[in-house]
Amino acid sequence: MRIPWDELSESPAKAEQLFDLILHSLYRDRVVTTNGTGGDGGIDAWVEDLGQAVEFKSFTKLGKSQRAQVTRSLDRAAKKNPRSWVLVAPVHATLRDRQWFADLADRYPFEMTFHDVRWLESKLVERPDIARYVCTTPHQEALDLVRDLREEQAALLGGAPDLRARLEVLGDRVDEPSPMWGINFASCGDQQGIVVFPKPSSPPQRVVVHLDVDADNPRQCADARRGHRRGGVRHRHGRGTRIHHPREQRCAGRAEPALGAGGDGPAGPTRHRRVPRAALLRPRDSDGRLGRPLHLTLHHATFGGRGMDVHGTDSTGMLRTRLRVDRPDLTGGENGGNVGMLLQYGARDHEHAASVDPEALLRTVQVVDALDRTTGMALTLHGSTELIELDVPDRQPTGHFTPLAATLRDVVQMREEFGVVITSPATWSPRDHRNVAILAGLLRGEEIPMPLDSMVCHQISSAEEARTYVEFFGTDPGARLDFQILGLTLQIAGVPIPVDPLYLAFSHARITNSDEVTTALANGEQIVPVDLGPAPGSTVLGRMTPFPSPRPDEGDVD
């Protein structure tokens, strides 16, 4: 089957799972995988008897920012003194990419190998069950088989022995999709049960159960609706977004079981009950169209004032979430419970914040921005309010996330252009945000207002040149002045970024040392220092290419 590498790059947990399965198929119990995000020391897997460190990256291109990530991981791994280091990434490596890696390998004393997408696909050809497991939904395949069985029960020409034979065939088929999980099923009347169990040969894995129904698949949506009629619980985000109940569970009554949190009483689940679940949020507009999904991992649940709070993170680890779920008895029960979301942006440790791929973070923030603008969505930033009023019919967008998305787009552009590592915006000062906006505008070829009102252009002039300056700039409002400066840097989170060359323009310039210039000319001096700065109310503009030449009737001076 075709592997959707670009889609996998947007789901790091799923990509790491594929990498984990491939390595265990190659080395079995000789390999230990860590799959850490930002804290794995540059080693995602370790083969003890070979002294081999393996690093996996899910990106599909090898640009400047991706190369910087590889270099950081390699530097951390080198401190462990491995005998060899292997980079695995689904990149269609070019000759230039290979040469870059070869040059990188020359700097280290151990052997280095780069396995690109061709190597990955060759291993998946040998193990198609891994590709099926990661890229399809085995549980849904099993449910399809059960439905086939129910349809065939009306045509069992051989009677009960025929049914047993068919069950044995179906049992063999449901074991095929997954290298990790076996599936048993049973039928009693019109009820079917499915038991999922780990196969003896499966490697250790983090277990997540997806809660979403693929809304682009009409068959799955129909299944979800049938499940709702049988008593399933549907959750609404205000009136605009919903978390669909899981296909694997048919839950009746409270909101808690549909999120897998459990709980015996109507007030909510047991405090700090673990919820190892992956959830999918999608904005839905007034016409019912779904936007890009936001992937969340729900970690644990606690008591809430009206039901429960389910805590989690997004796939980058930079967005912490709290879903506030109403008890259905507060909202009528039949239509499910309301859900609001509380957000806290920023990683607790700076090392993790620096390691987050800004493109992945940008995708997260863009989805959150879309959710914020969804009709009825209860979306609140941590610190602004602790109360999420789920019953407000016409909730206005907070507007917090549109500027953040714009900033992250700028960060992605600057990483690619300058090849520098910039930390997460969660740690920035107001000046950092301002400098990011300036640099991004300059890279786009725009004329940007510059915070250089106190800047002075110092000229060592002849007497004749000084008289020309006095003629043009000695009286208000002063003429326009265009000039070029070299060596300017702007700092973002402590990282100096050169802006060289930079072309500046004062819309109106003035001589800031006019008294000294007048005195020097009156004394007949031939060398006259002249300082030119922006006049009061003048605009200081910057760009990375020369300004267009002024028209002769404008009276400006270059």
Image (cartoon, rainbow, N blue to C red):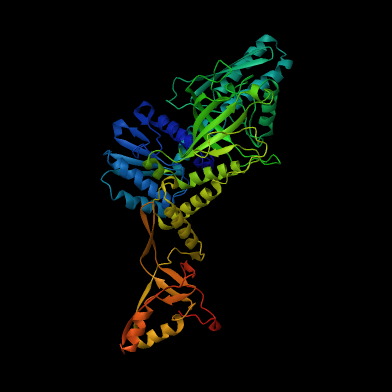
Where is residue 140 shown, x and y percent of the image?
A: 61, 27
223 versus 508 height, above or below: above
Q: Quadrant of the N terminus?
A: top right
Q: Residue at x 46, y 45 (%)?
A: 59
Query: So how many labels did they put on this image?
Result: 0
Q: Residue at x 43, y 67 (%)?
A: 453
Residue 185 shown left or right of residue 179 in the figure: right
Residue 200 shown left or right of residue 219 in the figure: left
> Residue 361 versus residue 112: which sits nearer the camera?
361
Where is residue 117 shown, x and y percent of the image?
A: 46, 43
Q: Quadrant of the C terminus?
A: bottom left
Residue furthest to the bottom:
524
292 versus 311 height, above or below: below
> Residue 503 versus residue 134: which sits nearer the camera?
503
Q: Residue at x 67, y 13 (%)?
A: 162
> Residue 249 versus residue 62: which sits nearer the camera?
249
Which quadrant of the figure has residue 238? top right
Which quadrant of the figure has residue 520? bottom left
Where is residue 252 shown, x and y percent of the image?
A: 64, 19
